[in-house]
Image: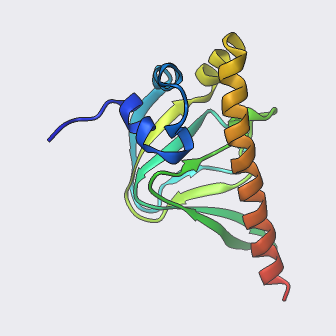
Amino acid sequence: MKIHTIPEILGEVPFFRDLKPEYREFLAGCARNVHFKAGEFLLLAGKKATHFYLIREGHVALEMEAGNKVFSIQTIGEGQILGWSWLVPPYTWHYDARAVEPVSAISFDAKCVREKCEKDPVFGYELLKRFSRLIAERLMATRIQMADLYQ
């Protein structure tokens, strides 16, 4: 069995696939493999956004509390990115994210990635375009979920 490097894994994921190989290497310098147990929180709304994740295995529920109830907004799975608040000051999470089952992921240190974006604006712009699409998708999922609640 061949063990894949983080840059190789990034090259297989749609979010990063067409990113230049040197930028995948750049990102890998801020990355490490992590694991979460079922029920464990990866993100907590209001807490500092210090990382973002590429989910490798398992599923994570994006949740928000409203009116003393917890609503599941979206489920994030294999090959998807979790977390965009690390990119936007004041760098705090807007949602909770809880592992629905055991999760393996690549964790990216947000400060490290932001510093690399500052050092290489072309790289930073490439990430900004990708994360802007992600933000729009998550906001639309929230809108749809909220519309369903009030029908």
Q: Residue at x 67, y 13 (%)?
A: 120
Residue 47: where, in percent of width, then height?
69, 42
Q: Is residue 48 visible?
A: no
**Residue 124 is drawn in which quadrant?**
top right
**Residue 37 is drawn in which quadrant?**
bottom left
Residue 112: where, in percent of width, then height?
59, 20
User: Which residue is at the front of the view, 78 or 53?
Assistant: 78
**Residue 147 is drawn in which quadrant?**
bottom right
Q: Residue at x 55, y 31 (%)?
A: 19
Q: Is residue 41 visible?
A: yes
Left-right relation of 115 to 145? left
Give the position of the C terminus as an image quadrant: bottom right
Q: Residue at x 81, y 68 (%)?
A: 143
Give above or below for 129 relative to 30. below
Give above or below for 108 relative to 148. above
Q: Residue at x 46, y 45 (%)?
A: 13
Residue 17: where, in percent of width, then height?
50, 39
